[in-house]
Amino acid sequence: MPALTKAQLAELLFEKIGLNKRESKDMVDAFFDLVADSLLKGEDVKISGFGNFQIRTKAPRPGRNPRTGETIPIQARRVVTFHAGYKLKEQIQDQELVPLAP
């Protein structure tokens, strides 16, 4: 399944809003830089009608090598989580299901 890229977002801004291509690319880059910087500072990013990005600290835990069954330690780490907002969830639920290509 194809993914929406930063380049495609910039192209859509160019087509729909009328910014020139350089401004569109700069705006997309600035948006993602702001999101990343906020997360690096430990701040949540809340985009109304879309969802929330948060940094979560995961505790260390034992893991298992699937081939050998050997127990291996998994280090503590920080991960980014995304929780879809109510409006986005509604839009997804209201959309007609499209079968996935094999």
Image (spheres, rainbow, N blue to C red):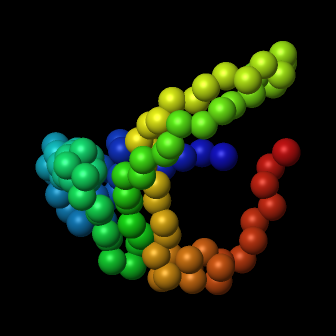
**Within the image, what quadrant is residue 72 found in?**
top right
Figure label count: 0
- Residue drawn at (46%, 55%), measured in percent from left and top? 81
Residue 43 placement (x, y as % from top left): 24, 58
Residue 61 seen in render:
yes
- Residue drawn at (48%, 49%), measured in percent from left and top? 4
- Residue drawn at (46%, 59%), measured in percent from left and top? 82
Residue 8 seen in render:
no
Q: In terms of depth relative to the viewer, which is nearer, 42 or 9?
A: 42
> Looking at the rendering, in which quadrant would you find the C terminus?
top right
Say if 100 sits above or below 72 in the image.
Answer: below
Residue 2 placement (x, y as % from top left): 60, 45
Residue 80 placement (x, y as % from top left): 42, 49
**Within the image, what quadrant is residue 45 found in?**
bottom left
Q: In terms of depth relative to the viewer, which is nearer, 12 or 57?
A: 57
Residue 58 placement (x, y as % from top left): 49, 45
Q: Is residue 95 left or right of residue 102?
A: left
